[in-house]
Amino acid sequence: MADRRMHARMHGRNKPTPPFSWLGLPEFDPDVPRIWGRRTRWYSRSRWTIAPLIILSVLGARAFGFEFSFAPVLVIAVLHPIYNSVLVWSYRRAESAGHSEGSSRVQVLLLLEVLADYLAMFGLIHFTGGAHSPLTLFLIFHVILAATQFSKRRAFMFASWAALGIWIIFFLHESGAVAAPPILFHGQSIIRDQGLILSVLRLCFLTATLILAGLITGKIMESLRRRVDQVAEATRMYSDTSEKLGSLYAIVGSMGAERRIQPILDLVAAQLDSVFENASVTIALLSDDGTALKFVASHGFSDDFFADREIEVGNSGFHNRVLLGETMVQGTLREQDPHPLRRHLHGLGVRSLIVARMAADGRPIGTIGLYSSQPDRFHDIDAKFLEMIAELVAIAVEDARANEENEGLVKERTRLMLEVAHNLRAPLGASMGLLDLVVSGYSGSMDEEARGHLDRVVVRLQALDDTVGELLQIAKSRDWAREIPDVVVQVGDLAREVESTFRSDAEKRKVRFQVDIEDALPTVESGGDLVAKILENLVSNAIKYTPEGGDVHLSVASPDSARVRITVSDTGIGVPKDEQDRLFHEFFRATNAKKLHVTGTGLGLAFVKQAVDRHRGHLFLESEEGKGTRVTVELYSLRPKERPALIQTATTSVSQ
């Protein structure tokens, strides 16, 4: 079944053939720049001055002693603004009815306007001496004005009308059918009888002048219009190129925000559809064995048009050439095309297409195509633009593939960590339970040396059990397939629980432990006990590595209504500068921490980083060896889909 949406896109803007073309009316292109003003009312704004000028001329002529048929001339002066008003009203009615400048109705009005002007002009010439009237020279200006507004052919037509009108007036006067009103100056005629031959010669010269003026002016204007059209085309291409570059920037930015293949391809298809109006888009990826192209994304076609559609590369010379690096542009699709897909596209109204190769490191990975209902729609600049897009999409696809492979490896590693940790925890718990019975004396008495050995075994097993527990925490925080449930936590309440938990540890180590919690903190979308574990790990580390008499400070504040800032600072041993970038890596412990012989797994801070990443928050570290450490965590009240850019910080960001 034909794709209705595709038909609508392909056939929605067919231009009908203008009616009344047989009249030879002026033709207009509404997209051509109007550097000479509106072509319909070609000089209508200045037309309102014609009647006052005629009246002033009549009064001035009478004042200087000229005598001619004043009354008919004044009648023409009065009629001129009347029919001009009728024409203006008709033009406005046509515009309000939605008729463009090139419509048949407006063209008919334009023809009536020109004819009315000629009738008025011929009337003035008749009543001011006929063919010998000095006003005949004004016909030259009329023809020149017409040539500046219309094509050379139209200008010649108007010049012919002007010449024909003068000859008609001449023959009417010479035959005696119509009397020629004289022009007198103080009672003397200023028009002398030059004889038939001289009058005919004079009119021949006037006719030649009118036609040459129309042709020459039309030729000049035709050349000028051609230059203007070239400038307009260059401007259009420049604007189109600028728009495409802006769209390219938007596409690159959008692709950078995506990490999976299908969303990237869908996004590119939609963006290209907006760049090329009324054009449809398809993207196909090459199979692993390189034998088939499978369409995986499209825009402008129905959802099922390319579903499970594949092209055998070996059976398609067209796509084979594309995959070899040739960008194929077809200006006209034929119904008898040998390729079934192109025949099907022709049935949907596609008349032109362009297909480019997507390649990574010179290796083809797919194709990207544009389709239009207009023949010869695409040009060289479109091919270059599509090639750039194809190159960028190929890079994004390869990056997304690598990302998906890495995610698969991380998932497999996480699964293995969870499995190993669970398998270790059960025997560890049983062993520690049995040892606890032996050490407690339930299995009989033992000497002090044996008890000491068992106590050391219990300590080692306890450390191993702590390591397994932290491995489980990290594995769960890394399990991105298990999205954080929408649980709202009060960070202030969690901080108070941590204070009560670690207060006794701080007192045993003789470390001052201070907690400051700001009032009216925003809540945070979290999951399980992730935020609590962040607080516990940071406070535990700070107390563990702060010497006797030192200070540990936990503060929870809100820089704005959208964020919560957790800061844990201490006056402990600090972290060497050259080791700070590895502090949040798994199983890493600073060298000065190892020298203290304090047990540790190097997993606590790694968990903190994983948990902050899960919240799409920020993690900052400030530390100086021998002076202490400050760790800052910023979490968002509403967990964003992507980590927002940093607003302002003077410290090093760990989570980027």
Image (spheres, rainbow, N blue to C red):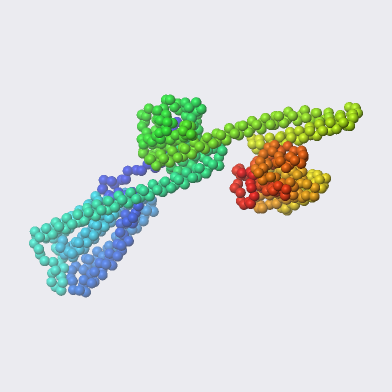
* Image spot of residue 101 (x, y percent): 34, 51
Identify the residue at image location x=69%, y=31%: 417
Percent across and percent down for residue 643 are: 61, 44
Which residue sits at x=59%, y=47%? Answer: 645
Residue 78, compared with residue 652, is above or below; it is below
Q: Where does residue 481 sit, x and y in percent of width and height?
A: 64, 35
Give whichever of 356, 54 is nearer the camera.
Answer: 356
Hey, which residue is sitting farthest right in the picture?
Answer: 445
Image quadrant holding the N terminus, namely top left
73 above or below 596?
Answer: below
Residue 530 in sight here: no
- The answer to whether any part of residue 164 appears in the image is yes
Front residue of 159/110: it is 159
Q: Quadrant of residue 256?
A: top right
Q: How many marks?
A: 0
Q: Is residue 118 above or below residue 361?
A: below
Which quadrant: the C terminus?
top right
Residue 91 image offset from top left, x and y in percent: 34, 55
Q: Is residue 510 left or right of residue 40?
A: right
At 18% across and 57% down in the image, what residue appears? 209
**Residue drawn at 30 percent across, 59 percent down:** 43
Q: In the shown orientation, is residue 621 left or right of residue 515?
A: left
98 displayed left or right of 289: left
